Amino acid sequence: MKVAGFTFIRNAVKNDYPVAEAITSILPICDEFIVALGNCSDNTESLIRNINSPKIKIINTVWDDSLRDGGAVFAAETDKAFNSISSDADWAFYIQGDECVHEKYLPLIKKEMEDNLNDNRVEGLLFKYLHFYGSYDYYGHSRRWYRREIRILRNNKAIHSYRDAQGFRLDGRKIRVKLIDAYIYHYGWVKPPDGLKSKLRNFNLFYHDDAWMAENLPETFEFDYKNADRLVHFTGNHPQVMQKRIALTNWKLNVDLNQLHKKMTFRRKLLQKVEDITGWRVSEYRNYKIVK
């Protein structure tokens, strides 16, 4: 069984993405790793090369900055990386530049790939998610955050990244997957307040035109944590590859968790209560079909 990892990235240093940690977190179970490196204005390339692994192959790409409708450029860059994977790879392990996998899950993930290698019903493996927010001590747990997403795929070039690269499709249809008991740790929202403000503006540049940005996210706007909704204290431990970054944290999350919860509408509170009691997320968006 051959496994290829893949990702895309641009300006990771400038935007404070833990892409080196992301790559390193899954590298032990990958035989090769493709990085689609966009046209950077910082030293992201050096950051990746300093991982110093013969498994890593960098392909240089140029982002189409005119693709500002729904994050389509992210999907385009993901496809570039996926299409560069060696033809003899069986599985493709996708990870984004602000995600990590805890080392405790690697043996289980490898076994799931081995066990499902010859089961053609399974076209991908579905992961659970922890979305850390504001600090490494809290994660978002509400309907605002997606619970699951595909991160391992068969190396089938008919598969393509969907919409803003959150998921995938095969010839336009949903991919058949198995849900596995492993988590992706998502760190994209772990930043000090000024960092979150910059993230929100930079992120939305790939979704909206200048007029929308000027009206909704002017440079003078203040970040208010309103997209947090509901935060839960994290009592576990983070991946080993993240420990150095966490040790350098020099801020605390300064927000009233009860006030955040009060901002939820009655409907959202009711639906969240249903999920908490039953585990069922009513009307959940699923860009996949669970078959096993």
Image (cartoon, grey):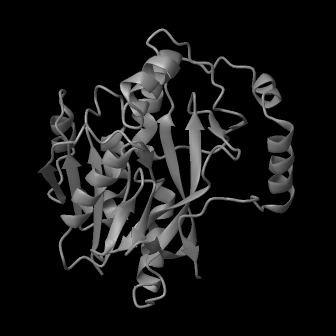
Q: Which residue shows up at 45% across the image and 90% down it?
A: 119
Q: Which residue shows up at 16% across the image and 38% down it?
A: 45
Task: Determine which quarter of the picture holds residue 195.
Answer: top left
Compared across the picture, whether 15 is left or right of 266 comes to: left
Residue 101 at x, y = what percent? 46, 54
Above or below — where is 47 with respect to 95? above
Whether residue 250 appears in this view of the structure is no
Residue 147 at x, y = what percent? 62, 55
Whether residue 123 appears in this view of the structure is yes
Compared across the picture, whether 265 is left or right of 35 comes to: right
Residue furthest out toward the front:
211
Above or below — where is 196 with respect to 236? above
Compared across the picture, whether 90 is left or right of 197 comes to: left
Q: Which residue shows up at 58% across the image and 33% down it?
A: 133
Residue 219 at x, y = what percent? 43, 12
Q: Which residue shows up at 41% across the image and 82% down it?
A: 114
The foreground one among 99 and 106 is 99
Residue 223 at x, y = what percent? 56, 18
**Quarter the N terminus occupies:** bottom left
Above or below — where is 3 with respect to 52? below
Above or below — where is 111 with respect to 28? below
How many numbered circles are shown? 0
Task: Determine which quarter of the picture holds residue 3.
Answer: bottom left
Compared across the picture, whether 179 is left or right of 63 comes to: right
**Quarter the C terminus occupies:** bottom right
